[in-house]
Image (cartoon, rainbow, N blue to C red):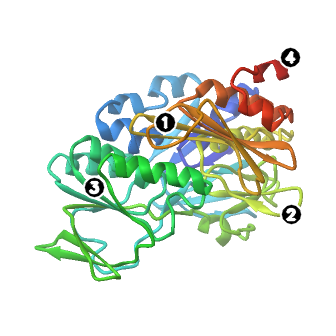
Amino acid sequence: MSGMLIVGAGLAGLTVAETLRAEGYAGPVTLLGAEPHAPYQRPPLSKGFLLGETAEAQLMMRTAEAMEKKNILLKVGAGVTAIERGAKQVTLSNGSTLAYDGLALCTGARLRPLPLAGASLGGVFGLRSLDDSRAIKAALDTAQNVVIIGGGFIGLEVAAVARRKGRQVTVLEAAERLMARVVPPHLSQFYLDLHRGQGVEVVLAATVAGLIGADGRIAAVKTGDGREFPADLVLVGIGVIANAELAQAAGLDVAGGIVVDACSRTADPAIVAAGDCSVRRLADGSLRRLESVQNAMEQAKSAAVALLGRERPFTATPWFWSDQYDVKLQMAGLTAGFDTVVTRGAAKVDATTRKFSWYYFRAGQLIAIDSLNQSPDHLTGRKLLDKGISPTPEQAADSSFDLAALLA
């Protein structure tokens, strides 16, 4: 039995499977998941689930009955060890093989390890999977001193949860500012002030020199300047690595991820890739890798259509979000290269201001919006960016001007 084979049962893999059915494909669809769980949502793992506001049952994306109704065969605990492109088959970790007509690689990413002795001590965690979040959630019940290594989205979201639970929290960030890879300096400063205002000790330009243990468990984190921060729970959040080795071993193009085009196609016409494992080659030849729910879903839809021999390029504006304390950050577009930024909704912005948006322009054209507790701005902004419609900076800064009217 051949048909469509999907490696990876996360959001991207599930979306490929369901899109194939929605597009009328009637052949076999098999979804292989290395984890022992049915497809589940990952964003709440560092937010609502960890805080206890989201039940585990709410994480599950589809019931077994829903999968069966769509005639999607889900195999959990089914890791793939090799792709044989010539024979159009994959080898599973148990030694068995499965043939395919079309193959979708949705293998995700794994945590970047901390290259220090002590990283395997009890009480030291990474956060990528449901099992990771379960373990951290249990450890937070008794922890008193929490140290977060890495001031990116995941680290700061967990810091916010731990602080809301009353724990002493320290964030150690190697860069000169928080979330430096993905947000502009003024947004980094806002979050620095926000966390410090909540009682988090944030140390920037921090070099982690060692993890100190006692009786097999973490006791402290030592920095390069000789300081020691007490810790009975450490979260390592220093990024992820795309799971592209399977594709690379099969001779596919890999450059920080599995290289695909706007339709999620690899160089092999029978193989597509989507989600965190992939990197998209843009029209100018540059590569872009995004880690987001939207990217996983939209790439997966393109991938499914490509397997059916059609084209549906992913062209929508990228968007992201993060929940920290009572602040929901929603980001639309990419701010790189902006030359003008204006504020809408607040005369003055500081850590006590909770409802406003920043609009970013390059050469007079709107390129991105960051909204804090302003979902209407975010939704309108995405539509403007998708349609290539730009207000002037003066219009964006004027709260009395109806930006949605530009869409009419």
The mark lying in front, picked from 3 and 1, is: 1
Looking at the image, tell me whether mark 2 or mark 3 is earlier in sequence order: 3
User: What residue did someone put label 2 on?
Assistant: 285
Q: Earlier in the sequence, mark 4 or mark 1?
A: 1
- Which of pointers 4 and 2 lies earlier in the amino acid sequence? 2
Residue 136 is left or right of residue 269, and the answer is left
Q: Position of residue 289 (x, y in %)?
A: 68, 57
Q: Are marks 4 and 3 in contact (CB under 8 Å)?
A: no
How far separated are the C-alphas under marks 4 and 3? 48 Å
Name the residue located 32 percent from the left edge and 30 percent from the top edge. Answer: 53
Q: Is residue 77 shown to the viewer in this render?
A: no
Residue topped by disc 1: 353
User: Which residue is the site of mark 3?
Assistant: 169
Q: Is there CB contact under 8 Å for labels 4 and 1?
A: no
Is mark 1 in CB contact (under 8 Å) with mark 2? no
Q: Amino acid at mark 1?
A: Thr
Tell me the distance, in whole angstroms, between the alpha carbons under discs 1 and 2: 41 Å
- The residue type indicated by label 4 comes to Ala
Q: In which quadrant of the rendered view does residue 313 lie? A: top right
Q: Is residue 211 above or below residue 265?
A: below
Q: Quadrant of residue 260?
A: bottom right
C-beta proximity under 8 Å, tags 4 and 2:
no
